[in-house]
């Protein structure tokens, strides 16, 4: 029988975890995470990691599997995820991949293209631009040089923007051109399921989840991570706003409102990405789902 990998995608707070668990229970299989933040063990509340009950209900892989102090990238993720999926398929005809990180999901579907080596000179040049002219300058430069990647990249993640510009300055070609050159051949069938929620419904869920995170101890969690705020893993929504609060540049209420705003913006970027992925079957999870018909 052909092995099938179900991939659950959608915006943050759309309900991917719950759907993935239901699907995994239906097929008696396990779940592989495709979340570039939940993979770090030090980050819990702020990345909406599955609860202990959810983790017990179905075995998850690549959750809290890496430290923020160790380098991690999409190439390493692809290798680990494919190895886990191949192992799971030795025991079961089905597996579930779930997450909102488009780069990670694309790596599992299409593989990672060989990226050019970057010289120290070019890397230093781009780093100097960032330090002297700031993130907005790099954003505008990327928009000018590679509009396609600019439209989907997390614009607050300076390292991803720097990486794309490094490749452009090194080769004269766009980061997008290297990302789309080859497609890996997988020995399993892929079915992509997207969760589609009305805009206001998603906004309400984001706001409610943020308030619950604060109630559950996000401020305390962020305070414990404050000394590591320079790390790339922590340059992310839910933590950087609280880091500003700790440095007295904004109030706690302002930080919480910014988390909600930035999360909505992140959700919009995710949907922009996923709407360009072919062969997604979009579903409304407010209706009853027949898993055998997915």
Image (tube, rainbow, N blue to C red):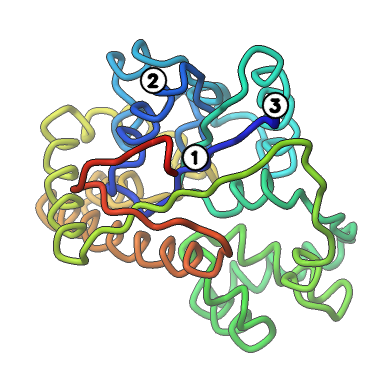
Where residue 1 is drawn, which disc sits there? 3
What residue is at 28 percent from the left and 49 percent from the top? Answer: 14
Disc 2 to disc 3, C-alpha distance: 20 Å
Instruction: Tell me residue 293's x, y (percent).
Output: 42, 42
Disc 2 to disc 1, C-alpha distance: 20 Å
Q: CB atoms at circles 2 and 3 under 8 Å apart?
A: no
For the residue pair 225 and 177, the one nearer the viewer reads as 177
SS class, disc 1: loop
In the drawing, does residue 267 fall left or right of residue 228?
A: left
Q: Nearer the viewer, mark 2 or mark 3?
A: 3
| Quadrant of the drawing holding the N terminus | top right
What residue is at 9 percent from the left and 53 percent from the top? Answer: 253
Instruction: Tell me residue 149's x, y (percent).
Output: 62, 73
Instruction: Read off the residue under disc 1.
Output: 35
Instruction: Read off the residue under disc 2.
Output: 25
What residue is at 67 percent from the left and 48 percent from the top? Answer: 109
Instruction: Count how many numbered circles sit on residues in the image.
Output: 3
In terms of sequence position, does the residue under pointer 2 or pointer 3 come before the other?
3
For the residue pair 69 and 65, the one nearer the viewer reads as 65
Instruction: Tell me residue 25's x, y (percent).
Output: 39, 20
């Amino acid at each position: 029988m052909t092995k099938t990998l179900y991939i659950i995608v959608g915006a943050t707070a759309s309900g991917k975890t719950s759907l993935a668990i239901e699907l995994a229970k239906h097929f008696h299989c396990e779940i592989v995470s495709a979340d570039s933040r939940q993979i770090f063990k030090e980050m819990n509340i702020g990345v909406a990691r599955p609860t202990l009950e959810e983790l017990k209900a179905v075995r998850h892989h690549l959750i809290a599997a890496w430290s923020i102090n160790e380098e991690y990238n999409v190439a390493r993720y692809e290798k680990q995820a494919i190895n886990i999926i191949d192992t799971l398929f030795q025991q079961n005809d089905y597996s579930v991949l779930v997450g909102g990180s488009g780069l990670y999901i694309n790596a599992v579907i299409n593989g990672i293209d060989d990226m050019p080596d970057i010289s120290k000179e070019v890397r230093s040049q781009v780093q100097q631009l960032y330090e002297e002219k700031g993130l907005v300058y790099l954003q505008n430069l990327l928009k000018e040089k590679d509009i396609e990647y600019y439209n989907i990249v997390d614009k607050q993640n300076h390292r991803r923007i720097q990486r794309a510009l490094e490749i452009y300055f090194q080769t004269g070609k766009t980061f997008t051109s290297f990302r789309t050159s080859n497609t890996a051949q997988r020995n399993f069938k892929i079915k992509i399921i997207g969760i589609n929620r009305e805009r206001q419904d998603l906004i309400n869920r984001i706001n409610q989840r943020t308030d619950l995170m604060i109630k559950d101890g996000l401020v305390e969690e962020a305070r414990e991570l404050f000394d590591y705020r320079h790390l790339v893993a922590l340059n992310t929504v839910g933590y950087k706003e609280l880091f500003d609060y700790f440095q007295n540049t904004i109030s706690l209420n302002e930080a919480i409102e910014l988390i909600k705003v930035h999360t909505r913006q992140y959700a919009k970027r995710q949907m922009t990405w996923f709407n360009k992925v072919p062969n997604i079957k979009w579903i409304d999870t407010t209706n009853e789902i027949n898993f055998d018909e997915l």
